[in-house]
Image: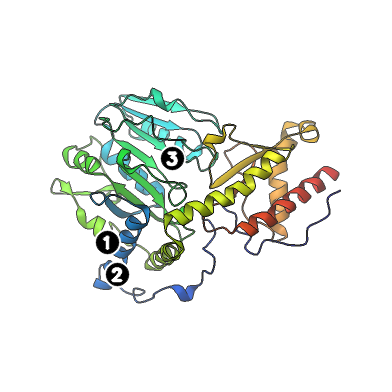
């Protein structure tokens, strides 16, 4: 039997959202001048604008793109893009995990798009994106948050394509480089990429997306939280710190603190390197462990953020389907009760699995320490 390890992760935060706070995080890093003040005051708008500008700089967003803070996290930002731009012409929604499937349901059941193609694939796979016509608007998820499958490249998007691209990048930005020239509306959430507080999303619009919004009025009503036009033009104040509704200034300061931490490390390139190094630790271990398999079979499509893996092998295969499904949850629950690792059971709609976040706010040493604990917990479960 495997001996119980002695070293626990110092920061046992492996949730895939909200993710771990950055190393050294503390409340005393926050500026508090905005607390108790209106978000429309000079100081409030300045901090919101600073969060926007720093995000744009850190992500290498082109100068002529707009970046704004939206309500409702990544969901609010992504649905605002869908509600404002889809319905203009044919559209394709591509999905290969649970959140992408939400966008399919939006397109089918809520917007009821008349000229719609749905592309989907099982967890761990990606549909044939090259089959999407270049005239179609397309909604896709850069990185499958609950499956660990990412797009390997953007070769399937023509540089001069007629359709709009709407990209849910919530578990990809700050870990993977975005091909901005091919992206028209890109969204993400503070709590996913930088471990910041929730409920706020970012919407990044290309000039092509702005032109679509200004020239097109969808046939469905737009809730106030989705309205981005004023007098037929894009409301640029939204992208200068005048949010549609009241934001949390405390959450804003938390996000700014995370951005400044990443900037001090070397910006997004340093964050990419941290995520890649973190993921390599897990990916190499999974490949070397006979009783594990990566949910994503193709290495080119494997994420460097939320790594998802399943159990296999003689003992596991001898269990009933019900008992197999319980194995990951039992391992995760046991280690959580021992303060070894928090919230790394697989997503509820995904195949039974474990999902460990490897983004840049996680430390390599903590991942190295987690691995022997998973091995020990699994052996304990086998021993009964």
Q: In this view, does 12 lie to the left or right of 302?
A: right
Q: Which circle's residue, 1 or 2, is located before the other in the chain?
A: 2
> Quick one: SS at disc 3?
loop
Tell me the tag on residue 162.
Answer: none
Tell me the tag on residue 44.
Answer: 2
212 up-or-down from 162: above or below: below
Tell me the tag on residue 142.
Answer: 3
Q: Is residue 188 left or right of residue 43?
A: right
Q: Which circle's residue, 3 or 1, is located before the other in the chain?
A: 3
Q: What residue is rendered at 34% in x and 25% in y?
A: 116
Percent position of residue 37, x then y? 31, 74
Q: What residue is rendered at 53% in x and 46% in y?
A: 304
Name the residue carrying label 1. Answer: 241
Q: Which circle's residue, 2 or 3, is located before the other in the chain?
A: 2
Q: What residue is rendered at 62% in x and 43% in y?
A: 283
> Quick one: SS at disc 2?
helix
Q: Nearer the viewer, residue 355 or 292?
A: 292
Question: Of discs 2 and 3, which sits in the foreground?
Answer: 3
Q: Nearer the viewer, residue 283 or 100?
A: 283
* Pointers 1 and 2 in contact (C-beta within 8 Å): yes
Percent position of residue 120, x then y? 47, 28
């Amino acid at each position: 039997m495997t001996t119980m390890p002695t070293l626990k992760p110092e920061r046992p935060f492996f949730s895939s959202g909200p993710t771990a706070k950055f190393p050294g995080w503390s409340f005393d890093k926050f500026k508090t001048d905005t607390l108790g003040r209106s978000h429309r005051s000079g100081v409030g708008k300045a901090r919101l604008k600073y969060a926007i500008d720093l995000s744009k700089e850190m992500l290498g967003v082109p100068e002529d793109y707009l970046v704004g803070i939206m309500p409702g996290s990544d969901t609010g930002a992504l649905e605002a893009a869908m509600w404002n731009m889809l319905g203009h012409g044919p559209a394709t929604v591509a999905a290969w995990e649970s959140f992408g499937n939400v966008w399919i349901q939006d397109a089918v059941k809520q917007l009821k798009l008349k000229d719609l193609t749905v592309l989907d694939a099982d967890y761990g796979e990606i549909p044939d994106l090259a089959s999407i016509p270049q005239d179609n608007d397309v909604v896709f998820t850069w990185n499958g948050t609950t499956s660990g499958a990412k797009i390997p490249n953007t070769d399937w998007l023509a540089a001069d394509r007629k359709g709009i691209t709407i990209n849910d990048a919530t578990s990809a930005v700050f870990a993977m480089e975005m091909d901005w020239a091919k992206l028209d509306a890109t969204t993400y959430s503070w709590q996913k990429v930088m471990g910041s507080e929730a409920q706020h999303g970012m919407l990044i619009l290309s000039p092509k997306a702005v032109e679509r919004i200004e020239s097109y009025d969808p046939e469905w009503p737009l809730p106030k939280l989705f309205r981005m036009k004023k007098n037929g033009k894009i409301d640029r104040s939204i992208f200068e710190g005048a949010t549609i509704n009241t934001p949390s200034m405390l959450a804003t300061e938390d996000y700014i603190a995370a951005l400044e931490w990443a900037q001090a490390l070397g910006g997004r390139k340093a964050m990419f390197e941290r995520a890649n190094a973190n993921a390599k630790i897990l990916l190499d271990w999974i490949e070397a462990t006979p009783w594990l398999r990566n949910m994503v079979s193709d290495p080119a499509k494997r994420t460097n953020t939320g790594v998802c893996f399943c159990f296999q092998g003689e003992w596991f295969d001898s269990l009933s389907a019900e008992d197999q499904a319980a194995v990951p949850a039992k391992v995760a629950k046991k280690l959580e009760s021992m303060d070894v690792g928090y919230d790394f059971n697989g997503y509820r709609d995904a195949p039974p699995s474990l999902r460990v976040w490897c983004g840049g706010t996680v430390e390599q040493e903590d991942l190295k320490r987690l691995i022997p604990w998973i091995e020990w917990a699994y052996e304990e479960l086998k021993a009964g």
